[in-house]
């Protein structure tokens, strides 16, 4: 994986753009849950609701990562996610990346690791053998 170091700034800007898509996924996922469970009247569903939203956002990311190696913001910023074979990650890698990246961003270790990693990779990508790189048609 001797990829050229990808600067951090396009990945962070892509992350801001990604947040807008995640907001849309959250709204689209929340509506049926709230309507079907009458959530406002049943606060005991809070943990179930949070888990449902976590899985919904995870579905968005893992489906795109596994299918093409790119979410829509990643395509806009000409970034793609590949495994050691140069193909999009497997379902297992995509799911593990989602869980590990959430933990890494909550703790801040993902950003800190990217600053010291020799290739600028996030810790979750390094652990899973994945590379976030410039899309091959944009090199």
Image: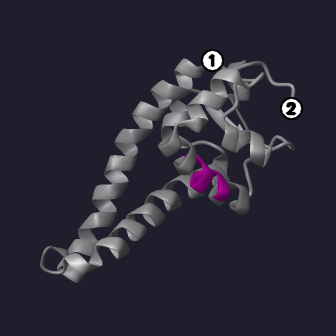
Q: Going 28% across and 57% down the picture, which residue do you hit?
A: 27
Residue 1: mark: 2
Give the magenta part as a residue range.
96-101
Quick check: can you spot residue 130?
no
Query: Residue 121: where, in percent of width, then height?
Result: 70, 31
Residue 118: mark: none
Q: Is residue 97 left or right of residue 48?
A: right
Q: Going 57% across and 44% down the picture, which residue do you hit?
A: 104
Q: Going 55% across and 50% down the picture, which residue do you hit?
A: 103
Quick check: can you spot residue 19?
yes
User: What's the CA distance linking mark 1 and mark 2?
Assistant: 16 Å
Asked if the stretch drawn in magenta spans residue 58, the answer is no
SS under mark 1: loop
Q: Is residue 99 left or right of residue 85?
A: left
SS under mark 2: loop
* Mark 2 residue crowding within 10 angstroms, few (<14) / some (14–19) / many (20+): few
Q: Is residue 134 left or right of residue 38?
A: right
* Location of residue 32 by image quarter: bottom left
Magenta highlight: main SS:
helix
Q: Nearer the viewer, residue 118 or 17?
A: 118
């Amino acid at each position: 994986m001797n990829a050229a170091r990808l600067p951090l700034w396009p990945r962070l800007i892509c992350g801001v753009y990604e947040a807008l898509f995640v907001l849309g996924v959250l709204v689209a996922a929340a509506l049926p849950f709230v309507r079907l469970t009458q959530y406002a009247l049943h606060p005991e569903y809070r943990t179930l609701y949070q888990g449902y939203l976590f899985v919904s956002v995870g579905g968005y990311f893992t489906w795109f990562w596994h299918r093409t190696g790119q979410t829509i913001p990643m395509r806009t910023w000409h970034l793609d996610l590949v495994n050691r074979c140069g193909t999009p990650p497997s379902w297992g890698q995509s799911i593990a990346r989602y869980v590990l990246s959430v933990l890494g961003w909550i703790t801040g270790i993902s950003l800190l690791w990217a600053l010291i990693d020799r290739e600028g990779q996030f810790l979750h990508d390094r652990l899973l053998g994945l590379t976030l790189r410039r899309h091959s048609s944009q090199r």
